[in-house]
Image: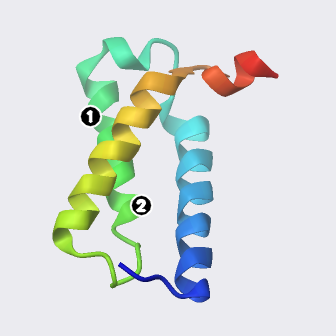
Amino acid sequence: MSLTDKDKGEVKRIARDLLETLKREKLVLDWRKRQQARAAVRVAVEEQLDELPEVYTEAAYWSKCDAVYQHIFDNYWGMGKSVYAEAS
């Protein structure tokens, strides 16, 4: 898939917006232990990535949703704690 510079900028904006929303609203203490909280994070990922440029096929969309959710699950523990916060 080939992205224009405009598409790349849009993808970056979507990623920033998603992370901001998740940190502010969804990544609460022990979110990974509660099914309802995990589902809320998954829905937020799907809704935000639904704004991806049209160059993304349906298969690519679902693949990105899976990859983004898994990355968040593996690296963001909630309440501001993440693999990234630990490193700084």
Disc 1 crowd rating (10 Å Cα; few below 14, some 14-19, many 20+) is some
| Rendering coords of residue 2 (x, y %) | 42, 83
Residue type beneath disc 2: Gln
Q: Quadrant of the N terminus?
A: bottom left
Structural crowding at the residue carrying mark 2, measured as other residues with C-alpha within 10 Å and reported as few (<14), some (14–19) or many (≥20) = some
Q: Position of residue 73 (x, y in %)?
A: 40, 27
Is residue 82 visible from the viewing direction of this image? no
The residue to which callout 2 is attached is 48
Specify whether 55 is left or right of 81.
left
62 lies above or below 20: below
What's the residue at 38%, 62% (across, down)? 49
Q: How many marks?
A: 2
Mark on residue 75?
none
- What x and y, as percent, mark residue 35? 24, 21
The answer to whether residue 70 shows anywhere in this view is yes
- Does the CB distance between marks 1 and 2 fall below 8 Å? no
Q: Residue at x 62, y 56 (%)?
A: 16
Which numbered disc, 1 or 2, marks the residue that appears first in the sequence?
1
Question: Which of the two residues, 10 or 17, is positioned nearer the viewer here?
Answer: 10
Q: Left or right: where does residue 59 sit relative to residue 25?
A: left
31, above or below 7, in the image:
above
Which residue is painted at 52% across and 14% down in the image?
29
- As drawn, is 59 to the left or to the right of 5? left
Q: Give the residue furthest to the front.
A: 2
